[in-house]
């Protein structure tokens, strides 16, 4: 069989622990036998990040800007324990944070739907994709504990010295205070990433805030989204047959719970943090969530939403068998290959991505799955496979070509 050709390389970002093991297996079993794979390889494993003073992460993000599509393995975000474990020079920052800052992108998370892993919400038939604005608000706030009576004010001093001043509260006793901010430029990038991704995936876009209460702060989010939509996207949405829908956050939550799914739900930072955990757990499993970072100028970085599955890695190092779910990492590869195929006009590369996803899904739907899914499936007569066994079962499906 002739291998499928590529034009432009994918930016390949390797990672850590159990997902690094899966990464190699996926490439060897599911990609290399079928695709004449072209990648520009960046090792974002913690040892290499430490060795290069984290320059490798910056370079991988710059390469993503250059080529447009990256696929990333999960990576360790160091904490004190990791600094010791890996004898790090510094507590390097989260690679995802570094890459997101360079690409100025928004992360879209969507569940992979298979028969037999049923969402807890009965009406959900299609994936709900969460887009989280990942800048500012309470995540960059300044807080104070007020010790006793006194006046709290909000003061802005312009570069020219002009002052704006509002009384927050005349405290009669102790209390708490918080000051937070956001930037129009960041909200604009978020808006463009959301509208582009909606067009790209042909899904409606929902956005919600509490603008009835927050008449300046949240209202600015609402206004910027609407202005950019009207000026740059309304016609394209009409042509694509999709809609942009704004509502209040509490109304959005109520509608989501009664919906069928199949749309993108754009959220402010805090709402996105909370709602993405609700959506992923209600769809069944963190191991079945995909994640893609989309920059406002149309660069894509695909990955699994879960981490490096450390506990399984230590079992693996001990020579014990693991049953780690590789589905989200497989879908990171298929997402990146499909996007590369679309951008380069390679229909067979995009078709291969479809086949890889269909083979993965039908393997599970036939009852062959890893332990995490076996524990929650409604399918009878399940065969629990180990990490490698599952990937080999998908390979077999790909080769025989008979997919559901
Ligand atoms: P995790 O790797 O997502 O794993 C947490 C637990 O969830 C696992 O112990 C496992 O449960 C289950 N799980 C997650 N993915 C699974 C899979 N593919 N197959 C089967 N079970 C799966 O989160 P963590 O243990 O909190 O974090 C480990 C490391 O990952 C940390 O160093 C963190 O910094 C990093 N991290 C990276 C990213 C990223 O690169 N995007 C995201 C999150 C975390 P059981 O143990 O019960 O089987
Ligand atoms: Mg969270």
Image (cartoon, grey):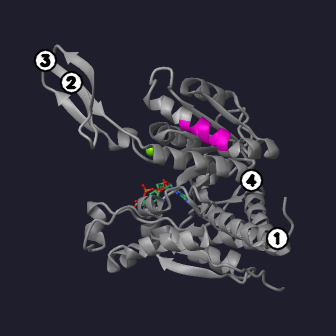
* Viewer-nearest residue: 50 or 59: 59
Query: Distance between the Cα atoms at labels 1 and 3?
Result: 69 Å
Is residue 165 rendered magenta in the image? no
Asked if the residue at label 4 sits under 8 Å from ligand 1, the reply is no
Query: Distance between the Cα atoms at labels 2 and 1?
Result: 61 Å
Q: Residue at x 73, y 63 (%)?
A: 360
Q: Identify the mark nearer the N-term, 4 or 3.
A: 3
Query: Distance between the Cα atoms at labels 4 and 3?
Result: 67 Å
Query: Distance between the Cα atoms at labels 4 and 2?
Result: 64 Å
Q: Residue at x 27, y 44 (%)?
A: 159
Residue that lies at the very extreme toward the right in this rendered image: 402
The tag on residue 149 is 3
Magenta stretch secondary structure, dominant: helix
Q: Identify the mark nearer the N-term, 2 or 1.
A: 2
Residue 335 visible in the displayed image: yes
Contact (Cβ within 8 Å) of mark 1 with mark 4: no
Element at label 1:
helix
Q: Seen in the image, is 324 located left or right of residue 309? A: right
Magenta residue span: 224-231
> Could you tell me residue 195's position as x and y percent?
65, 46
Is residue 227 rendered magenta in the image? yes
Query: Distance between the Cα atoms at labels 3 and 2?
Result: 10 Å
Name the residue tied to disc 2: 152
Contact (Cβ within 8 Å) of mark 1 with mark 3: no
Residue 79, by quadrant, is bottom left
């Amino acid at each position: 069989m002739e291998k499928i050709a590529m034009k432009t390389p994918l930016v390949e970002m390797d990672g850590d622990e159990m997902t690094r093991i899966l990464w190699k297996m996926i490439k060897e079993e599911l990609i290399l036998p079928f695709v004449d794979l072209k990648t520009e390889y960046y090792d974002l494993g913690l040892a290499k990040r430490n060795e290069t003073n984290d320059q490798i992460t910056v370079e991988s993000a710059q390469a993503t800007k250059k080529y447009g599509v990256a696929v990333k393995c999960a990576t360790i975000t160091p904490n004190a324990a990791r600094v010791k474990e890996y004898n790090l020079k510094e507590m390097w920052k989260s690679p995802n944070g570094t890459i997101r800052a360079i690409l100025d992108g928004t992360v879209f998370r969507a569940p992979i739907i298979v028969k037999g892993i049923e969402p807890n919400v009965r009406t959900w038939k299609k994936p709900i994709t969460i887009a989280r604005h990942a800048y500012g608000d309470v995540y960059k706030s300044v807080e104070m504990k007020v010790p006793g009576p006194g006046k709290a004010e909000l003061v802005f001093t312009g570069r020219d010295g002009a002052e704006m001043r509002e009384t927050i509260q005349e405290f009669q006793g102790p209390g708490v205070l918080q000051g937070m901010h956001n930037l129009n430029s960041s909200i604009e990038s978020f808006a463009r990433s959301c509208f582009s991704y909606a067009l790209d995936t042909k899904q409606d876009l929902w956005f919600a805030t509490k603008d009835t209460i927050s008449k300046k702060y949240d209202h600015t989010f609402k206004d910027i989204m609407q202005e950019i939509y009207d000026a740059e996207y309304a016609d394209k949405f009409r042509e694509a047959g999709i809609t942009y829908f704004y509502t209040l956050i509490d109304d959005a939550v109520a509608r989501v719970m009664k919906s069928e799914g199949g749309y993108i739900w754009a959220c402010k930072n805090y709402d996105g943090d909370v709602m993405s955990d609700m959506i992923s757990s209600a769809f069944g499993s963190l191991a079945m969530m995909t994640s893609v970072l989309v920059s406002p100028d149309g660069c894509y970085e695909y990955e699994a939403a879960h981490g490096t599955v450390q506990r399984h890695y230590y079992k693996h190092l001990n020579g014990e068998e693991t049953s780690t779910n590789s589905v989200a990492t497989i879908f990171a590869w298929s997402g990146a290959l499909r996007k590369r195929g679309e951008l380069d006009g390679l229909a067979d590369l995009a078709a291969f991505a479809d086949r890889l996803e269909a083979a993965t899904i039908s393997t599970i739907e036939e009852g062959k799955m890893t332990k995490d899914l076996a524990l929650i499936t409604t399918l009878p007569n399940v065969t629990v496979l180990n990490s490698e066994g599952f990937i080999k079962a998908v390979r077999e499906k790909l080769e025989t070509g008979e997919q559901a």
